[in-house]
Amino acid sequence: MTENRHISLNLTNEDVLGMYETMLLARKIDERMWLLNRSGKIPFVISCQGQEAAQVGAAFALDRKEDYVLPYYRDMGVVLAFGMTAKELMLSAFAKAEDPNSGGRQMPGHFGQRKNRIVTGSSPVTTQVPHAVGIALAGRMQKKDLVTFVTFGEGSSNQGDFHEGANFAAVHKLPVIFMCENNKYAISVPYDMQVACEKISDRAIGYGMPGETVDGNDPLEVYRAVKAARDRGRRGEGPTLIEAISYRLTPHSSDDDDRSYREQEEVAEAKKNDPILKFASYLKDLDILTDEIEKEIVERIVKLVNEATEYAEAAPYADPEHALKYVYAE
Ligand SMILES: Cc1ncc(C[n+]2csc(CCOP(=O)(O)OP(=O)(O)O)c2C)c(N)n1
Ligand SMILES: [Mg+2]
């Protein structure tokens, strides 16, 4: 018999169904984006596939009205949970003027939306880490009760920005949650050619903060760890490093061919642990995700994704003159 693990985390059946629906929405938007890319309608896709449990589990553990998130390019699950809509994500994929992230100026995946406290990132990986630390410091100076949540890949955890941000946050006991989404590859480079330590979370001790590795295919495990990190941050005890282990189910991006550097049997094997299928079976075993509810969820999502696609495809591009704005002072 499946044990009900979400009750002890104070999560209701509604909460876990909400988590599942957000994970599935992210997956379905992502899948649609690949179809649009392959049919020549959108230029680029960088996927969340395989990482939805880590992203949504973490976001649900945050205060989605107060906290700031500094996501990296795969975090569709995080930004959906923080209030960005399917339509807005599609506007970004089609690079249309109404895209809230950048008005179609940036590549997709550079999420930023002021009203939802989603802080935009740059294309050089890991620059979001010192920004998250700075926002946590600003929050402390303004006596706000907020926590900042920043994510990055395991490859990105080798960048100097990670070291500087983690060190500063720990010295000043700032409420920052560092979450490494370890999907086992940095483009074509597998984990053991990126780092010599066993776990990314082992690095935490060097900064004087707790570090924990969790199963990133299990949203409840990620939820538990992020919730504890948030409580710790709010108590003034400082930052936490969480490593969520998953697997990148797609090539690095729509411009990558992963057959040149990994066995497709490995990908097939990882698909058996697909976080969406696993969470669905947990919810089904407990009779929370009934056939009827599942049908409703799928119908809602298909409708949202279709509407978002149609709207974004028909939406206007920015005027050419717009490209000259925001480069120099007006
Ligand atoms: C500073 C910098 N170096 C290199 C790149 C090119 N680049 C983009 S994504 C990426 C791989 C990052 O891997 P990881 O951090 O594991 O994230 P993942 O894509 O696997 O989620 C690289 C090298 C970059 N954007 N910025
Ligand atoms: Mg990676």
Image (cartoon, grey):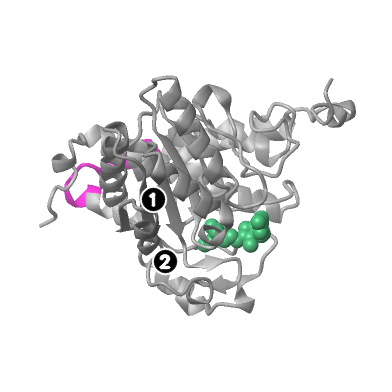
Residue 13 in the figure: left or right of residue 25: left
On screen, residue 267 above or below 147: below
Residue 156: image x %, image y %? 55, 58
Which picture quadrant has residue 29? top right
Which picture quadrant has residue 247? bottom left
In which quadrant is the C terminus drawn? top right
* Residue located at (37% from left, 36% from top): 175
- Judging by the rendered image, the residue that carries numbered circle 1 is 54
Residue 273 on the magenta span: no
Residue 165 visible here: yes
Q: Secondary structure at mark 1?
A: helix
Residues rendered magenta in the picture = 283-297
Q: Is mark 2 within 8 Å of ligand 1?
A: no
- Judging by the rendered image, the residue that carries numbered circle 2 is 271
Residue 279 in the figure: left or right of residue 12: right
Residue 302 visible here: no
Residue 199: image x %, image y %? 38, 67
Disc assigned to residue 215: none
Residue extending furthest toward the right: 321
Q: Earlier in the sequence, mark 1 or mark 2?
A: 1
Residue 132: image x %, image y %? 50, 38
